[in-house]
Image: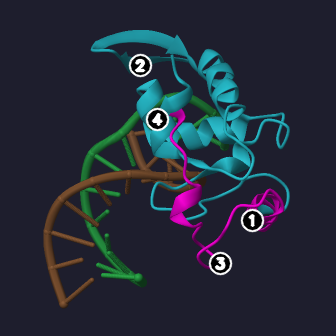
Chain colours: A cyan, B green, C brown
Amino acid sequence: MTILVYEEGNVRKANVKDLLEIVKALLLLIPIGKVTSYKEIALMLGVSPRLVGRLMAMNDEAPIVPCHRVVRSNGHIGGYSLEGGVEIKRRLLILEGVKFRNREYVSSEVMVSLKKFYK
DNA sequence: CATCGAACCAACC
DNA sequence: GGTTGGTTCGATG
């Protein structure tokens, strides 16, 4: 369960459980009607975007912890492993006021950087 | 814009 | 050990 994390020029150990808690906290910072990307979170944590996706899937408190507000870096809606799949994800986002460019992509203006809230 | 291949990395079998 | 994802990037047309 322990993995390596690249942080501020150093490599340190962390376990997936801890990362999951951090990710949850980050997700709660995303304003309603906005989204962020797997990449953004991956860069902040120093892990691979794929792992971020896995962490989302491990989130047992969805949609209270809004893992549906995370999309691909190019705006594509991405995936959703919970009951209902991407359909539910899209519905939740629309419900929150997220604008879509088309069925698969959110509008670029709803992407928000989490770094603003960091530090 | 769309598709493709490769790198990604812990979980799962 | 091989496969599988809630991905990304660069190359190509």
Tag 3 residue: A103
Tag 1 residue: A90
Q: CA distance from mark 3 to mark 2?
A: 35 Å
Q: Are marks 2 and 4 on the same chain?
A: yes
Q: Are marks 1 and 2 on the same chain?
A: yes
Tag 4 residue: A42
Return the x and y of residue A72 as percentages of the image width and height.
52, 56
Q: Amino acid at mark 3?
A: Arg
Dividing the picture into quarters, in which one does residue A46 lie?
top left
For this rendering, which residue is in front, A29 or A42?
A29
Chain of the residue under label 2: A
Q: Which residues are magenta?
A: A86-114
Q: Are marks 3 and 2 on the same chain?
A: yes
The question of residue A69 being in magenta is answered with: no
Q: CA distance from mark 4 to mark 3?
A: 25 Å
Please state which of the two labelled residues, at mark 4 or mark 3, is closer to the viewer.
3
Q: Earlier in the sequence, mark 3 or mark 2?
A: 2
**Number of residues whose C-alpha sits closer than 10 Å to that of mark 3, classed few (under 14), some (14–19) or many (20 or more):** few
Chain of the residue under label 1: A
Q: Is residue C9 left or right of residue A6?
A: left
**Number of residues whose C-alpha sits closer than 10 Å to that of mark 1, classed few (under 14), some (14–19) or many (20 or more):** many
> Which structural element holds mark 4?
helix
